[in-house]
Amino acid sequence: MASEKIPTPLGSNFIRTIVDKDLEQGVYQSRKWAGSPGDAAHHATGQPDVAKIRTRFPPEPNGYLHIGHAKSIFLNFGLARDYAGVCHLRFDDTNPEKESQEYVDSITDTVKWLGFGWENKHERHLYFASNYFDFMYSAAESLIEHGHAYVDSQTAEEMRITRGTLTEVGKNSPWRDRTVAENLTLFREMRDGIHADGSLILRAKIDMASANINLRDPAIYRVRRAHHHNTGDKWCIYPMYTFAHPIEDALEQITHSICTLEFEDQRPFYDWLLARLAEAGLLAQPLPKQYEFSRLNLTYVVLSKRKLIQLVEEKQVSGWDDPRLPSLAGARRRGYTAAGFKLFTDRIGVSKVDSWIEYTILEDCMREVLNESAERRIAVLDPVKLVIDNYPADQVEDCFAPNHPLKPELGKRVVPLTRELWIEREDFMEEPSKGFFRLVPDGLVRLRYGYVVQCTGCEKDATGNVTVVHCEYLPDTKSGTPGSDSVKVKGNIHWVSVQHAYECEVRLYDRLFKEAHPGEGDRDFLNDLNLNSVTVITAQLELGLRNAHAEDGFQFERHGYFVADSKDSVAAKPVFNRTVTLRDAWQK
RNA sequence: UGGGGAGUCGCCAAGUUGGUUAAGGCACUGGGUUUUGAUCCCAGCAUCCGAAGGUUCGAGUCCUUCCUCCUCAGCCA
């Protein structure tokens, strides 16, 4: 009997495969959880962990979250959700000079917006690395006591030189063999503020000849007099990421510590450190394991924190929430949705391959989600007047437009038809190009939800610009009335009554960079900025749009998706941002 | 030139211990529906898995050699 191949579950990736195997083998069955993070003794008092796995999303609060973080958030929180686990939101705040409360707030806000939480009625899994400073300090002393760390008096420059290179081994520091007692005294003096910033440093004692540079006695604790957003002035020494991160994971009983590829060669130190601390009895077993996946690269976008900070600080954009920025705050203001990001992260998958995702994939995801959710409205973005010459000047007639063609239950709304209308300038061509089937002299076209009209001509100004288009309507062709289909037309254009229009500011956004790979080679990425990434226009919208609230999203028919801006809208006078255009086979 | 990774259709990406026709999505190309040139529907789309050898009845999956790309020398994370 041939064994049948089991189809791969959707969303399968190498991390899920690892989790599946770990769960199957009961690797984490013996884990205990004492209700809060802590050392071995603390968790020994706890119960078997009800969370099957624990993951964490560990941002440093030194900037706003961007689209790349969304991938990590959906991965970590998604894994926890799918495997009956828990995901901790943990701020990795070990460098006081770059971190601040503003960033903490924006990050929690964004994670919530994406649909994730970290608390239930019993526990709140919101943590700060800085709350573990006491433990980290004692872990460092433990390392010293066991001969696994020493205080170095070399300068940063000397350390750089003695570290060796990629192909040459390093040299031992002359201070490498200080006694335990001396190291302990010095380290305590570092803590007590006896020594100047940068004068002494605590290093792990591993192997200066290691082929892995990260194992050549890495720095783990530095002296730095800086005010910390959480611990204030309590400390003048701060742990390095390399030292702090594994400990944070272990204290929180993280099972799968997922990070990006550039931390791959840090893993041996991660394992080394935790093993030393566990053998000293400080950390509970089993220890967390680190896994790496490839970070997101998106074409036409920069996703490095450094570059994003630069764009904001140099005022190339209006702020962290500029709708053109790939920050999640900016994307949100642009009208991108959490559901769209979910679709996107599902679609791109998780692997270890260095890849560049085409930006259009993200846009398509937003279109797909918005097509389903957004109500339809009418907007004339580049207005030109259309006069129906055989229509009474004082007449106002109700036309009915469905709010959502896929959801009749959402009903219809009234749009008033009058003699003078605004139509899209590009919907009329005096001399049509091949394949154009909208308004042309003598041609027939349907006014969407209204009548079929026949174009009778146009007026132009001295420079040849069309100022008014004229037409006559065919009385028996009104949409929704019997026999309205008797006249078949291919073209179908939208319109807004001049008397009933809401004149409104609309921002049309385009990509921020004109190159697929900004800053590729030795180009400065700023040279690749698209100088026309935003166009502000005055549009004529259907009147009801005046009542839109901040963050309300709509499809402006035949144009795209738009959202009422959350910052610049005022009551009864919203302004709109274009989220993304509709696909347009004609333009191609 | 040292260490650590990665190479499956234009872009992503499945492919558990080798098993017989290489998932799926996006894009693309045809065709259909449509009062959004949108949506939707249907069909097509890798004799081939970076390259070359080898083992085997059988290889994307094992072995050998080679090639390309990413990454590491902060008291950043």
Image: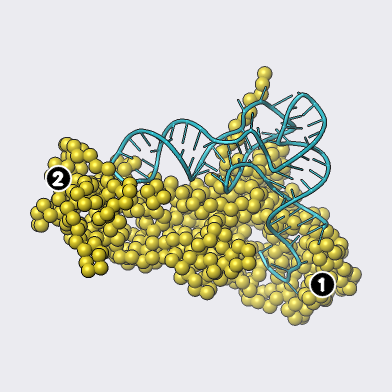
Chain colours: A yellow, B cyan
The answer to whether residue A532 is left or right of residue A276 is: left
Between marks 2 and 1, how big is the CA–CA gap? Answer: 86 Å
Tag 2's secondary structure?
strand
Badge 1 is on which residue? A161
Pick the front one: A90 or A1: A1
Report the label total: 2
Tag 1's secondary structure?
helix
Q: Amino acid at mark 2?
A: Leu
The answer to whether residue A360 is left or right of residue A195 is: left
Q: Position of residue A224 (x, y in %)?
A: 70, 76
Mark 2, Cα crowd under 10 Å, few <14 / some 14-19 / many 20+, is some
The answer to whether residue A578 is left or right of residue A390 is: right
Mark 2 or mark 1: whose residue is earlier in sequence: 1
Which corner quadrant of the image does residue A504 belong to?
bottom left
Any part of residue A140 in sight = yes
Any part of residue A400 in sight = no
Q: Amino acid at mark 1?
A: Ile
Which corner quadrant of the image does residue A158 belong to?
bottom right
Pick the front one: A123 or A375: A375
Pick the front one: B68 or A288: B68
Badge 2 is on which residue? A474
Mark 1, Cα crowd under 10 Å, few <14 / some 14-19 / many 20+, is few
* Residue drawn where x is 35% and y is 61% of the image: A576
Pick the front one: A459 or A139: A459
Q: Are marks 2 and 1 on the same chain?
A: yes
